[in-house]
Amino acid sequence: MRNLLPFLVLIAVASAFGNIQTQFDGPDEVELRLLEPAVVPDPVDGVSRWWYTPSQKAHIYRHKYPKNIQAQPRQGEDLRLPGDVLPRLYNVRLLPFIEVGNWTTDGYVEIFLDCIISTVNISMNSLDLTIDPASITVTEEQTGNPISVVDFIDEQSTREIITVQVSRPLTAGKQYKITMKFISILNALLAGFYRSSYVENGETKYLAVTQFEATDARRSFPCFDEPTMKANFTVTVGRKETWTSVSNMPLITTEPIVGMPGFVWDNYQTSVTMSSYLVAFMVSEFIGIPAEPGLSNVEFSIWARPDARNLTDYARNIGPRILEFFESYYNIDYPLPKQDMAAIPDFAAGAMENWGLITYREQYLLIDPSTATARAVQLAAVVSAHELAHQWFGNLVTMDWWNALWLNEGFASYMEYIGTDAVEPDFKMNDQFIIENLQYVFGIDALETSRPINIEVNTPAEINSMFDAISYEKGSCVIRMCADIIGLETFQRGLTRYLNDNAYGNAGQDNLWAALQTQADSENVILPATVKEIMDTWTFKMGFPYVTVIRNYQTGGAVVIQNRFLLRKSNDTTDPTVYQWWVPLTYTSDYTQTKQRDWLSVDEISKSLPNLGAAANQWVIFNVDQQNYYRVAYDATNYGLIRDQLIADHQRVSANNRAQLLDDAFNLALTELIPYADALDLTLYLKYEREYVPWHAVLSELNYVDIMLYNFAEFSNWKTHMTSLVEPYYNFIGFQETQSDPHLTKYCRIDAMNWACRLGVADCVQNSLSTYANLMSQPDNLAQIVSPNEKSTILRTAIEYGGQTEYDFAFNQYKTKEDTSFLVAMCASKQATVLSGLLEMLLDPNSGILRSDVNTVFNNVANNPIGNEIALDFLINRWDDIQNALGSVYFATWYRYVCTRQNTQAGLDKLIQLRDAHSVILGNSNSVKQGIQTVESNIQWVSLNLGEIGTWLAGNQPAKTISKVIRHQ
């Protein structure tokens, strides 16, 4: 589920963080995409916010702080550099030995320094480097006179800092040079300068590549590893003469390494002024494939394995075009002479915006649009747009410290939609924003345990924790709201002002607000307060409001009230914050007219609007196109007017607001702020809805209701109601995908097929069985027979409605082709004996199910309505056997999985008894606590809402039709 009771959705995984390689270390990214519900790991330290979810896209762009690092900074210790001296220029020379058994890198660095405050200590960042103290020299730059080094203080293991102490104070205002030699290791942490590998023609090949953000440049060479300590970097990299290297800047010369036949130095042009985390280099056997000339004025290439050349065409086409668009949008030329994008086989991040050398995990750069899913193609475009947006936001202008990370990531997460839309208008990215970012992060930010966008961070672990949904998705929503407040064109010109004012420097959010304020003033934009005063309420407070609109149908006015929206409230909160915001009110009763505007100030809980401009029999909708970051609740009469309009002609209301109305209403009903009847009334029009965004916005909420009702008598009427809504949608979209289908039509079909087959709509089931039968006769032609967009639904439906033959074929395909989608489909069986057998196979190392897939199987069986109780009983009755076969690392995770569908007191009693029986393993697990809380919330939901929903369903059954629904045997 997404955007619905996040504490029901988020699964805490009791990951094994030890050194035993065979232990389960939490699901990998591929597994995460297969699992429903989503998974987040327990923290290593047992203190971090275990309840918190990452951004649904942040993992694409960044990696978490390496979890197997043993040394952690001492609590409360100052980890910041003093700033007495600052770097101006680095000369970095690295010679990596990329060979099994020798992963060392010989390093040498010269750093030219400006002395700001007189000091005898030169402190800089360093981590896991073996520094030769005898090689350290310090000289006065102007005279060349040496200054004696009297001490070398190595605090790498505690503070990630080294300090060189000199014999006499450096003089403020003078310039100095420090040099040293060191050795680093091409580590396997996927951080710093690390080793990666791939297999080509049966041979394992290696490469060395960097990943420095947030605080890992210090793993590669000693440096001032803070974003404000910008400098120029001259990089020299050694390599075998048959290999290649690439860095941020263009290659100038290549020369032999004296005394090392077969090795050469690649000397790169000195960089522009930039932060250390943006430095990048790679040594590999990759090839660079240039983009077609004419797409961009900037030299543009894709670097990849030689045998992946045919998968670079899409990136080579859209990348230069996005870059050209951003140059036009920002009205600022791209600052570097070239832009490379490299596809890395082992890459902890999904992508990284290194200036001039963007690195990607292969799946986000190498893609064949003719065989990839529509989602994969869109993701490839979006990730490229995100990283290219960073070349201005983040690289040209960098946040002054990591607390303002959202200035980087929020902007890139906003601009990725605009950039993708410029090159792929068929994707309608700006329409997708509200479901991909806004409604998603609503579900996270509606918890008391959320956080403000801007908070203080100091340690590397704290810094890396900022790469989350609040920085990314909420940041993008706040920026989008700001653009709506001052006007899109004014906002765009204000961004250009901000970038020009702070180019090659650093900025905080106040610098952005000041630039936008100046632009707004110059264009006579009238605001009730300064941009800073308005926007600070959204960046320094967590959460968001819901605005209640109570209309006066006699006067034509309304009272509007703001309150914080919370999915659940604790009774013992000590938070002193007053949760009120500057709320931009926009509303309309006619989309052909200009929307009306007003404000709720930060000091106003409520306000009277004298005239909404609507007659008593006209609907009014607030938060036009959901441009702003709040939910809206209406009085019952206005809900009725909106319902009637949607049924009569839903296109009189914008698609974004149709999506907003549905998502808001079900979340408001979930929190008992409006009756479920009002939310369900709005679903009646869905039989006429044909667009992707409104449908997708409400499916997760409908899925939750579906799960809760499944074992109750009301489910029959619910299924009939849902079939009456979904079947027309499915019939309109159709089963068969064609090459000419628009992008969002493919998205529509994924949703429509998923629900139609799930509900047993005959055409969907029969077509799925027919397609699967065709596949069984031609198992080597999967790509030609089954669209990748429809694959999961077709496989699942064939297992659900098929027999042993279909099941056996799926298992054989899984074993022979290692295609996990067949294994996931097997878990959709509605035969209890089959599901029990699947779970038993997890205990048999020779069953054919890979150890890496046992978690996938248990989770999908537990989420099968037939399999949920089977999974719980398996956990209860086979505990010792599970422990003997798999160890104890799965128990807390599996416990949490079975909780999602449980909603009865009897189920809760069984779960509590299981927890108490194994308190050593389960008693203190956050996953278990969250699971119990989930079941308690489910029980409460049933108690509060089952009767009301049952009554509504009984009174709103559709007229009988001739549609055929297939039922399970």
Image (cartoon, rainbow, N blue to C red):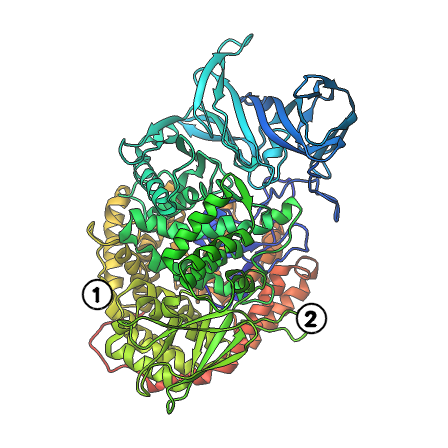
Decide if residue 966 is on the left or right side of residue 850: left
Q: Is residue 673 above or below residue 807?
A: below
Q: Residues within 10 Å of mark 1 (few under 14, many from 20)?
A: some
Q: Is residue 490 above or below residue 345?
A: below
Secondary structure at badge 2 equals: loop
From the image, tell me which residue sits under label 1: 732
Decide if residue 611 is on the left or right side of residue 47: left
What type is the residue that disc 2 sits on? Thr
Decide if residue 880 is on the left or right side of residue 836: right
Q: Depth check: 395 or 859 in front?
A: 395
Rendered location of residue 741, percent (x, y) = 22, 54
Rendered location of residue 451, percent (x, y) = 59, 60
**Quick check: can you spot residue 968?**
no
Q: Is residue 524 above or below residue 851?
A: below
What type is the residue that disc 1 sits on? Phe
From the image, tell me which residue sits under label 2: 574
Task: State which mark lies toward you, 1 or 2.
Answer: 2
Which numbered disc flags the more N-terminal residue, 1 or 2? 2
Q: Residue at the location (66% across, 32% down)?
A: 126
Q: Depth check: 24 or 424 in front?
A: 424
